[in-house]
Image: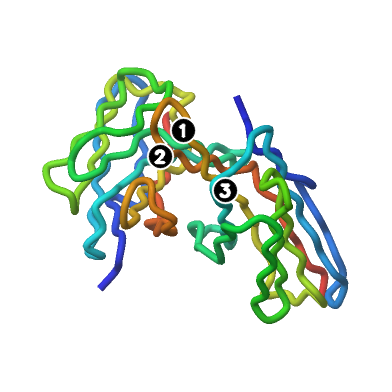
Amino acid sequence: GQQVMQIPQYQHVQEGEDFTTYCNSSTTLSNIQWYKQRPGGHPVFLIQLVKSGEVKKQKRLTFQFGEAKKNSSLHITATQTTDVGTYFCAGRRTQGGSEKLVFGKGTKLTVNP
Amino acid sequence: DTAVSQTPKYLVTQMGNDKSIKCEQNLGHDTMYWYKQDSKKFLKIMFSYNNKELIINETVPNRFSPKSPDKAHLNLHINSLELGDSAVYFCASSQGAGDNQPQHFGDGTRLSIL
């Protein structure tokens, strides 16, 4: 079953407002990746977090990895219409002797201009 | 010079038919994947191949059979298509199966079963 929970499922904001999506795993992750999928497009890699408590920034986007390496967040400051899309977290975990990337269900962001 | 290319982009077919989707990557990666994305946008891994060898095989009906003739290609054949197979199928590749490498996705194949 689903082992990487992502909330909220949908988020609608006014342009200029902030946005945050959260990702939680039931087990410790080796690392976590974030992807963005524009409407009608394919997932595109944004960033990877590996270390406990790691924080990375990409312009208006801030990514955090929890101390226990079980949760992560993506925060967008002052959203723009170009931020529209579905944001997926993907946690890498070892299962059955192999490493697997497990995707969250995604948070669909819409931005009202 | 598309990195991960899938064909066809759209596939509309009748229930019960057999169809194939092809995927090729020119990134020199050694691991390739097939994902299924349903109408709710949930991305679920189906298969993963590393250097032509199957390393991940999720609980997928055996009507789905992947084939990797070489590490740059991973094709997906589906027998006896069912209504529930309607989805977008994404091929992806990465450098290394267990390494901390990002996955590069193709544009997807939108499969519709009539």
- Residue A41 against residue A15 in the figure, above or below: above
In the rendering, at what x and y percent does residue B25 appear?
Answer: 25, 58
In the rendering, at what x and y percent does residue B46 appear?
Answer: 40, 33
Q: How is the image coloured?
A: rainbow
Residue A104, quarter of the rendered image: top right
Mark carried by residue A109:
none
Circle 1 packing at 10 Å, graded few (<14), some (14-19), many (20+), is: many
Mark carried by residue B86:
1
> On the rendered structure, is B24 left or right of A96?
left
Q: Are marks 3 and 2 on the same chain?
A: no
Q: Given contact means CB atoms under 8 Å apart, are the residues at marks 1 and 2 in contact?
A: yes
> On the rendered structure, is B33 left or right of A76?
left
Mark carried by residue B111:
2
Amino acid type of disc 2? Leu
Residue, x 48% and y 57% (percent of image)?
A: A42
Amino acid type of disc 1? Ser
Residue, x 71% and y 53% (percent of image)?
A: A72
Q: The disc numbered 3 marks a residue on which chain?
A: A
In the rendering, at what x and y percent does residue B13 appear?
Answer: 34, 33
Q: CA distance from mark 3 to mark 2?
A: 24 Å
Amino acid type of disc 3? Ala
Residue, x 19% and y 53% (percent of image)?
A: B72
Q: CA distance from mark 3 to mark 1?
A: 23 Å
Q: The disc numbered 1 marks a residue on which chain?
A: B
Mark carried by residue A90:
3
> On the rendered structure, is A79 left or right of B44?
right
In the rendering, at what x and y percent does residue B82 appear?
Answer: 41, 21
> On the rendered structure, is B86 left or right of A4?
left
